[in-house]
Each structure stands twice: as C-alpha cells, then as structure tokens.
Amino acid sequence: MENNNKKSSVFYSYNLNPQINFDTHEEGEKIILLLRSHPFTQIGWILNSIFFFILLFVLNLFLQSLLNLGQILIINLFFIVFILSYIWFNILSWYFNAGIVTNKRVIDIDLHAVIYKEITDAQLSKIEDITVKSGGYLQSLFDYGSIFIQTAGAAVNIEFNNVPRPTDAAQVINKLLSKKHGS
Amino acid sequence: MDLKNFFTFINIQGINNIFFKIIMIFFALFYFFYTLVISKQVQIMDKTLQDKYNWVILLITSLQVTVSLILLILAIFLI
C-alpha cells in the first residue's frame, strides 16, 4: 500500500511530495511524485567499477617490468580518474532520468548517455490507460517494475522504467485521474 | 626545430618515452573535452530538474573539469 509517511531524499527513488522544481513548472502546479530507477538496477555499473579497480591492481603487477616508476604512477592516475568518471557518469544518468507526477500532468525526463536529453509530458486529461509491468524474480523480490502511460490521440506515450513500488505509483496517478475526471 | 635537433631530442628522450607522452596527451585532451561536454550538459539539466542538492552535482562536475585540466598539464609538461 502507499506509504505517505515516507520521507523525501535526494537518494530515494520514490519521493512523495518532493522539494524539487523543473523548468516548465506552471503556476499552481503541485509536484506529487518523483520517480527514479530502483537502486538495485544500478548494480551492473557498481560491479563493473569494482572489476575495473581489480583490473588496475592486476595490471600493476605486469607494468612493473615494462615501464618505469613515473610512467606507472601516471597510468595509475589516469586509470583511477577514468574509473571515477565512469562512476560519476552513471550517477548522473540515474539522477537525471526521472519521472514526475504533478496534479496537472505526467513528465518523463530522459538523459541518454548524459548527452541526449528527451522530455515528454502528458496532461492528466489526455491519459487513457496505465499499465504496470513487473515480472521475474528480482523485480518481485525488490518490488520494482515499469509503468506505461498511454495517452489519447497522437500524443506520445510515457514510460517509467524500473521504478520502485510501481503499483503504488500507478495508484497515485489513478487517484489524480479520478479527481480530474470527477471534477 | 630542424630535423637534426628533432633527432637529437628523440635520442635524449627515448622513443618509448615520446610514444608514451603522445598517448597520454591524446587521452588527456579527449578526457578534457569530454568533461567540458558533461559540465555543459549538467548545467542544462540543473535548470531542467531543480533540487536543493544540485549544488553538489555542480561542484563535483566542476571538480572533474579541474582534474581533467590538471591531467592535461601533467601530460604536456611533466611526463
């Protein structure tokens, strides 16, 4: 069930009533929900980073016989900086890939490879159908999945991938839709 | 630098060292431009999605640009 008491934090993936703002924010528009990918879906790049550090350690064993001390130090410095950049790149991708639900519309902010930006929004009145997809062992265990929001006419459909508590999020949107259609 | 001085320079430095330096400069340059692009994109995204913690993101990104510049200077002058 929806837990309205949960606090909002920058590192949470499911934020109710977050203290954020966005550039196309309209007057009187209240931000209800902010969604990001579930932390478990980030495990891939975290493991890669650990692997790269191990690789650097192993590489150092071989470099000792090939290069001088100064060159080894420089290679280590470059390698460490690149690994840290890889970590930062993935944190940015996670942080700026967000889904926002307001009392007027649903917004999907996508940042691909930290270079390509795509922002899609749909008015609540245009939303026709909401589908929640969550399948497999990991998604069931960690309670995350995808939400597909179908809009009327030629408007673009919105997709929130791998978000935590997808059923709760869909419930929040459905409540807003009921209010909108009820009023 | 004429051709004679160029070969003298290579003999003093050693071909391996020069090759190593060229590769490091190439990587440092590439990395510097990459950090500049990331920095610009983060500034744009900071306006798109505004949060009270965004200053941390901007600070770390500026730090990344500074480090990349230090690496470039290191690659050109110190190796």
Image (cartoon, coloured by chain):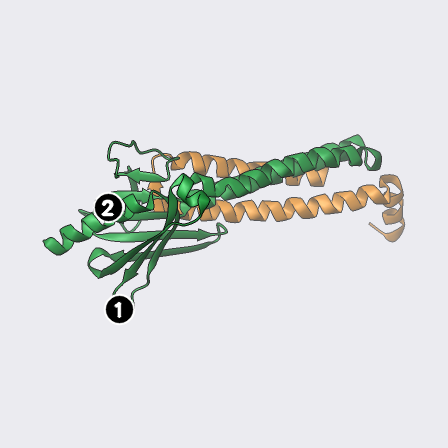
Which residue: 46% across, 46% down? Answer: A93
- The quadrant in which residue A125 appears is bottom left
User: Picture coordinates of residue A167 (x, y %)?
Assistant: 30, 46
Q: Which mark is residue A172?
A: 2
- The three-letter code of the residue at mark 2 reads Val
**Contact flag, marks 2 and 1 (Cβ < 8 Å):** no
Against B46, residue B63 (above or below) is: above
User: Picture coordinates of residue A91 (x, y %)?
Assistant: 48, 40
Give the camera-side residue of A125 and B27. A125
- The quadrant in which residue B79 appears is top right
Mark 1 highlights which residue? A153
From mark 2 to mark 1, how far is it between C-alphas?
Answer: 23 Å
Give the camera-side residue of A160 and B70. A160
According to the rendering, which colour does chain B have? Answer: orange
Number of callouts: 2
Chain of the residue displaying label 2: A
User: Picture coordinates of residue B61 (x, y %)?
Assistant: 49, 39
Of the numbered discs 2 and 1, the one sitting upstream in the chain is: 1
- The quadrant in which residue B67 appears is top right
Q: Which chain is green?
A: A
Which residue: 31% across, 55% down? Answer: A131
